[in-house]
Structures are given as structure tokens and as C-alpha cells.
Amino acid sequence: MEFKFRGFMAPVFTPFDDNRNLKLDIIPKYAEYLHSNGIKGILVNGTTGEGVSMTTDERIQVLNCWIKACGRYSTTLMVQIGGTNMKDVKMLAKHAQDKNVDAILCLPDLFFRPKTVNDLIHYLKIVSASAPSTPLLYYHIPGFTGIDVDVVELMKRRREVPTLVGIKFTDNDLVKANAACTTNAEGDRGLVFLGCDSLLLPAFLQGIDSAIGTTLNMFPELNNKILRYYQEGDIKMAAAEQKRLNGEIQKITRHSTWVSGMKGAMRKLTGIDVGPVRDPLVDVFTG
């Protein structure tokens, strides 16, 4: 199993109206905006998209709408299916495969938490069997889940899960992220998508070549400058742009949680009205 996408992928916000109901009619405009700003891949129903705050039916509706909106742009599409009961996770995996989604991202079980790599592999095997033709990535985000299973060992053993190709790594431990990229016994290199916008340049310097970052929605050009300067070998300029991005992140999140602040910034900075966040998050307006 192989997933060939490399580079930047934007985790999209889920649009809600003032009553916190889905507002899907904004998605075509949103998709056009991302495409016009050079975004070639998106993640649907992730943390940024408040996937775990939606019903299974809503998650399906949102994915279907993004599939339709992105069809004209040949956008690579990944969907996060975890954070709910096992039966619904399996159904969401099957639906994603039936719709020819390019890849699946999956959180671990959030109540019956995996304590070992063996536990996690057992869980991911069940997910994999529900979408046996679709690349699967594990979503490592211990700051939200409280689950910090050894992803380096997981990547070394990924052949045990037939469709597992990599991880989304949302943590500050770049030593661990880099180790997860290393080649396993079969000669395969692990695929790691960084999930920390503030650490792009340090991650690039350690050999990580892909990222899924919320700020790609509001600051696509700034993110792309960091990557371009790095690729050109101009580390000084790349560092300056990373500093600029980190300053924007600090302004946005100073008085809010990540998703609430970023969603407010999306509304204010881009003109794409993705609406408020859903409970239990508290909506904010950023300056």
C-alpha cells in the first residue's frame, strides 16, 4: 500500500450557521479559495474540522460535499474517521473507500484507550479491514487524546496493518517524529505528516517533507515561503518566515483555544464565512 502525496495539506474547517447546524453551501467557494491559493490536498473532519463534534451522518454529508466541490480541481482528499464507536468508525472507513477518498486518517479509541503498540495495531487492523484498498494513517495527537503510544515502534511494525502507510504527528517531539520516518526492516520509509504549524522549518531540517497545518487556510503564502526558502537552501529567510507565522499563531491563540481562535481568524482574514465553533468549544472573535 502506498500514498504518494507529499507537501502541504490543509485541514478544512466545517462550516456551521449561527445555530451550529451544517452550512454546506459555503464549501464550493471554500474549495475554490484553497485551490486558487495553491493548496493541493485537504483533510476533512479532523481536529480543525471538529469531526468529533458531529454525528456520523453529518460527517458523511460533509465529506460528500467536499468530494463534489474538489472534483474539478484534482485535489488529494483525506478524511479523519475516528473519535466515535467502533461500529461507526468501520462504517465511515467503508464509506470513504466507496467514495474513492485518497486516504483515511484515524484517531485511536478515546475511551478504551490503547496502552501498548499491540493494542493500537489490533485497533488499526479492524479499521484497515473495513477499507482494504485505501491508505490508512494513524492520528497521533497526545495533547488532545492523552494517548502517547510509541509511534516509532508502530511505524517499524506497520506491515502488520495491511493498509497503514504513516502517521499525522501532532506533537512537539521532533526527535520522535524523525525516528518514525526511519526505514523499517522491510526497507520501507515511514510517512509522517507534521501537525505543528510552528515547527515547520525544524521539521524540514530533520527530513520530514509533509505537513497538515491549520494555518494553511489563512496563511497559505506564508507557509509556502517557508518551504520554498528551505528547498532553495536559504535557511535564514525560511527562519524569518517561520518567525512571522509563529507571531500570527500567537496573536490568534493568545486568548482562545486552537480551533476557536483559528476559526475566528478564518472568518476575519479570508472572507470565507465558516461560522462559529460547536459546543463545547467557545466561539471567539480575534483581532
Image (tube, grey):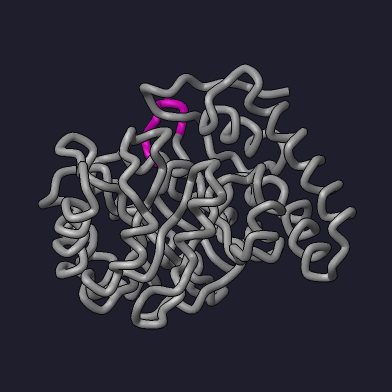
Q: Is 129 drawn above or below residue 245 in the view shown?
A: below
x and y percentages locating residue 278 in the rendered image: 40, 28
Q: Is 286 drawn above or below residue 24 in the view shown?
A: above
Number of on-image labels: 0
The residue drawn where x is 39% and y is 57% is: 152
Camera sees residue 26? no
Main SS class of the magenta portion in the image = loop
Q: Is 165 drawn above or below residue 234 in the view shown?
A: below
The residue drawn where x is 16% and y is 67% is: 130
x and y percentages locating residue 254 in the rendered image: 66, 21
Question: What quarter of the picture does the C terminus occupy?
Answer: top right
The residue drawn where x is 18% and y is 55% is: 118
**For residue 281, side relative to residue 257 (left or right):** left
Q: In this rendered view, identify the residue nearer to me: 53 or 203.
A: 203
Q: In this rendered view, identify the residue nearer to me: 239 or 71.
A: 239
x and y percentages locating residue 176 in the rendered image: 48, 51
**For residue 104, side relative to residue 274 (left or right):** left
x and y percentages locating residue 147 in the rendered image: 31, 38
Q: Is 56 drawn above or below residue 224 in the view shown?
A: above
Direction front: furthest residue: 185
Q: Is residue 46 magenta?
A: no
Q: Is residue 20 magenta?
A: yes
Q: In this rendered view, identify the residue nearer to me: 121 or 215.
A: 121
**For residue 157, side relative to residue 273 (left or right):** left
Camera sees residue 257? yes
Question: What quarter of the picture does the N terminus occupy?
Answer: bottom left
Residue stretch in magenta: 17-22
Direction left: furthest residue: 87
The residue drawn where x is 63% and y is 39% is: 266
